[in-house]
Image (cartoon, helix red, strand yellow):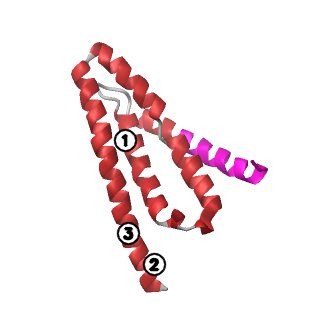
Amino acid sequence: MNMKNSLLVSVGGGIGALLRYGMNVMFPHAGIPLATLLTNIIGTFVLAFLTFSLFKDNHHSNMKLFLGTGLCGGFTTMSTYALETVKLMETNPIAAFLYMMLTLVLGAGMCLAGLAVASIWNKRREVVK
């Protein structure tokens, strides 16, 4: 592990964590944890887009570390999702189930949307070349 790569991941992760905190401020917890849901599905879209466009080849390793591992990794959160789901199960099992299903379905949908947008992006880039 070299210092430059560690710095790229650290700075990207810090920015991602700040963005996630901002989502929690903008969308306070009310019933279903909307901030975590939105954070995870937005992050899924962004990571899918990046993976199938900019990160498709190995020419962008610094951007992959900064944006993919750092920013998206710091922004999205599996642990908070799991904890919120368990807490909801204790108080409102129906909301917990809805939250789990929304996260799964919307996450998969946003991943497919990211792939589709990346495909369009890649085709336009080929035309420009």
Q: Which residue is mark 1?
A: 38
**Amino acid at dot 3:** Ser
Q: Which residue is mark 2?
A: 125
Residue 81: x percent and y percent? 41, 30
Q: Main secondary structure of the magenta part?
A: helix
The mark nearer the N terminus, 1 or 3, is 1
- Mark 3 lies on a secondary structure that is helix
Mark linked to residue 119: 3
The mark nearer the N terminus, 1 or 2, is 1
Q: Is residue 25 above or below residue 125?
A: above
The mark nearer the N terminus, 3 or 2, is 3
Magenta highlight on residue 2: yes
Question: Do the residues under discs 1 and 3 have CB atoms within 8 angstroms?
Answer: no
Instruction: Decide if residue 49 is on the left or right side of residue 30.
Output: right
**Amino acid at dot 1:** Leu
Give the magenta-colored segment's residue range.
Answer: 1-19
**Amino acid at dot 2:** Arg
For this orientation, the residue located farthest to the right is 3
Which residue corresponds to the image point at 30% horizontal and 18% vertical from the top-left? 89
Front residue of 38/59: it is: 59
Instruction: Decide if residue 101 is on the left or right side of residue 129.
Output: left
Q: Calculate the distance from the C-alpha at mark 1 to the C-alpha at mark 2.
A: 29 Å
Q: Calculate the distance from the C-alpha at mark 1 to the C-alpha at mark 3.
A: 23 Å
Mark linked to residue 1: none
Which residue corresponds to the image point at 32% horizontal and 48% vertical from the top-left? 108
User: Toward which corner of the image does residue 126 lie, by quadrant?
Assistant: bottom left
Does residue 56 appear anywhere in the picture? yes
Front residue of 28/85: it is: 85
Instruction: Decide if residue 12 is on the left or right side of residue 44.
Output: right
Magenta highlight on residue 29: no
Which residue corresponds to the image point at 39% horizontal and 53% vertical from the top-left? 45
- Mark 1 lies on a secondary structure that is helix
